[in-house]
């Protein structure tokens, strides 16, 4: 992202962190997707039970394509689980399903960070796409240097989205572990394994936020170099 210059040196540690986080979540997921949970519940069954127990009868559970493509759609009120997590009764499937229903519960109770993140979606989408072309034009065309400032503002919206995502994801995992630990889903010795799956996933969000922050710092440094 953005053209090559000396500020890429700042980004290298963050990219390394992101690479490590991706490997960690894939490794953890691969390991615990092969371990069957003792309750025998599939991810779909787990999600449905959690939703029903929280009075979320209007939230649907659907299978979606892809690997680790699991998510909660607040607009359509649907928990979507990837094929393995939807169909299988692995420890990973239960952990992921519980995490996504955690987002549905957040939506139900009006969890503030989730509401803020929803408001930031348009700004984040526009900022991540528009920042690069605007900044490049402003960087190379002296008469429109102000475009660099606009790009920084727009990209800051994307960075803020990444930062607000952190408490949303951490809280969803916290809710998931609390539910899974009540004895109806996982045994006491299975809970730590579910925590490992969710903790590994959490690192990917931390890494994404770190990379975004470094990119923003790069833009600011490059902008100052044109003054």
Image (cartoon, helix red, strand yellow):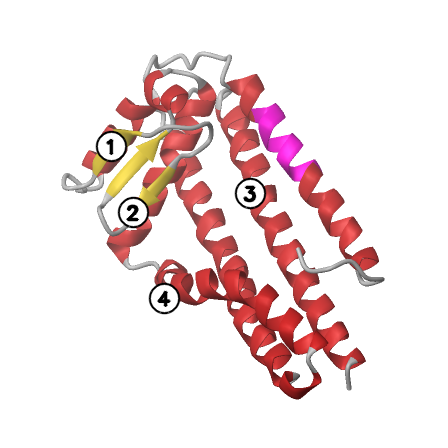
What's the mark number on residue 202?
Answer: 3
Q: With 42 as the anchor, is 224 left or right in this view?
A: right
- Verify whether residue 26 appears in magenta: yes
**How many angstroms separate mark 4 from mark 3 (CA)?**
22 Å
Q: Position of residue 53 (x, y in %)?
A: 21, 36
Specify which label sits upstream in the sequence, 2 or 1: 1
Callout 4: 10 Å neighbours few (<14), some, many (20+)?
few
Does 190 sit above or below residue 171? Answer: above
CA distance separating discs 4 and 1: 24 Å
Q: According to the image, label 2 marks what residue?
A: 105
Is 64 part of what is drawn in magenta? no
The quarter of the image holding the C terminus is bottom right
- Image depth: mark 3 or mark 2 in front: 3
Task: Tell me the residue that label 4 is attached to.
Answer: 119
- The residue beneath circle 1 is 61
Circle 2 SS class: helix
Helix, strand or loop at label 3? It is: helix
Q: Which residues are magenta?
A: 20-28
- Quarter where residue 23 is shown: top right
x and y percent of residue 109 in the render? 27, 55
């Amino acid at each position: 992202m953005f053209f090559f210059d000396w500020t890429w040196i700042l980004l290298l540690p963050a990219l390394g962190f992101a690479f490590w986080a991706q490997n960690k979540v894939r490794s953890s997921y691969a390991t615990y997707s092969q371990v069957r949970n003792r309750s025998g519940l599939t991810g779909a069954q787990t999600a449905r039970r959690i939703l029903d127990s929280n009075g979320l009868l209007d939230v649907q559970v659907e299978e979606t394509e892809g690997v680790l493509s699991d998510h909660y759609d607040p607009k359509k009120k649907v928990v979507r689980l990837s094929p393995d997590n939807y169909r299988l009764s692995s420890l990973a499937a239960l952990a992921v399903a519980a995490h996504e229903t955690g987002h549905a519960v957040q939506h139900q109770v009006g969890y503030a960070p989730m509401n803020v993140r929803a408001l930031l979606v348009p700004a984040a989408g526009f900022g991540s796409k528009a920042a690069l072309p605007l900044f490049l034009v402003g960087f190379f065309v002296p008469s429109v240097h102000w475009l660099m400032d606009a790009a920084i503002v727009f990209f800051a919206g994307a960075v803020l989205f990444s930062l607000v995502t952190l408490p949303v994801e951490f809280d969803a995992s916290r809710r998931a572990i609390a539910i899974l630990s009540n004895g109806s889903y996982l045994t006491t010795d299975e809970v730590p394994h579910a925590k490992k799956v969710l903790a590994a996933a959490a690192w990917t969000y931390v890494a994404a936020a770190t990379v975004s922050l470094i990119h923003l710092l790069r833009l600011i440094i490059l902008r100052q170099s044109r003054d």
